[in-house]
Amino acid sequence: MSNTHAPSAVFFEGEPNGEIHAMPLSACISALVAARETDRVNVVRLEHIKYTNNWLHEAILVELQEVDPDVAVPRKAYALIDRDADRPPAKKTCFSSSPSFSSKARDGVKLSRDKDIFTTSSDQYEIRRYIDFATHPLPFVKLLVAASIVTDTKPNYNLITAQCYWYAESVWDLVLLHLQKVWSDGWEKAADGSLGVPARSLAREMFAKFEGAWTKLETEIKKRRQVSSELFIIAGYSTSYLVFT
């Protein structure tokens, strides 16, 4: 059954191009769960990007696609996942945008139907590496959970050890570890020949936490669906009873 006309967490139908929606990672996860889109929005391409202006900011940019067999042309959207300092920077720095050596991090996701919104004539970016998920789509909610684990591991922005570079790199590593696990053959080709993650690294510790967090969320989603199905059946019986009495 098509979900095209239902409220969507990421496909903002009817909006003009150029609109952007920014929110915390947890809010986006909750929105996907509420809209019942956890299995209806897939990542089909993931890019680790670096902006080329003086900020040299790094981020994860993904292309999202609707999963609906009843729709001839699936809807698309784009999401930028990145880290910045919670306060505006005092001045530009060659490392990343940060007002001080250490401060509260602001990690989040920006959503838009227009990919061009994430670049301007004075603020271009280059693609450092990419992963093509065309044949093995990644649920968007799963990527958000992975990014949340990275946030929880180092919640403070640090100019040297936990800036935007570390954040984007860590999210990339978690996705790569997931890719290696679920797609043992050919993952190097999908990841543009990217090297694997070292055997002993913080990324592997975060990946173990990610698997636990994902299992917990998946169980919660299944329970929600079961309750919804039971309520639907009860409502159906109630309607039948009213009709035949």
Image: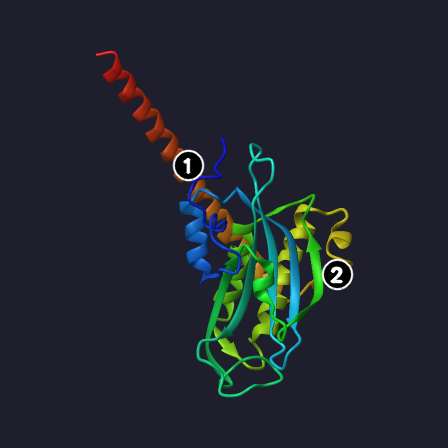
**Quarter containing the C terminus:** top left
- Cβ atoms under marks 1 and 2 closer than 8 Å: no
Q: Residue at the location (66% across, 46% down)?
A: 182
> What is the distance, in whole Å, between disc 1 and disc 2 at their CAs?
37 Å
Q: Position of residue 40 (x, y in %)?
A: 53, 42
Q: Is residue 230 above or below residue 64?
A: above
Q: Is residue 230 left or right of residue 189?
A: left
Q: Where is residue 72 in the image (x, y as percent from the top left)?
A: 60, 35
Q: In this view, does 195 lie to the left or right of 30?
A: right
Q: Residue at the location (69% across, 62% down)?
A: 199
Residue situated in front as seen by the camera: 44 or 176: 44
The kind of residue on which mark 2 rests is: Ser
Residue beneath disc 1:
225
Residue beneath disc 2:
194
Residue situated in front as seen by the camera: 80 or 174: 80
Question: Which residue is outermost to the front?
Answer: 16
The quadrant where residue 79 appears: bottom right
User: At numbered mark 1, what does the secondary structure look like: helix, strand or loop?
Assistant: helix
The kind of residue on which mark 1 rests is: Arg
Q: Where is residue 41 in the image (x, y as percent from the top left)?
A: 54, 46
Q: Report the label total.
A: 2
Q: Residues within 10 Å of mark 2 (few under 14, many from 20)?
A: some
Question: Which residue is outermost to the bottom?
Answer: 91
Q: Is residue 209 left or right of residue 192?
A: left
Q: In this view, does 3 lie above or below 22?
A: above
Q: State whether residue 202 appears in this view.
A: no
Q: Where is residue 186 in the image (x, y as percent from the top left)?
A: 77, 48
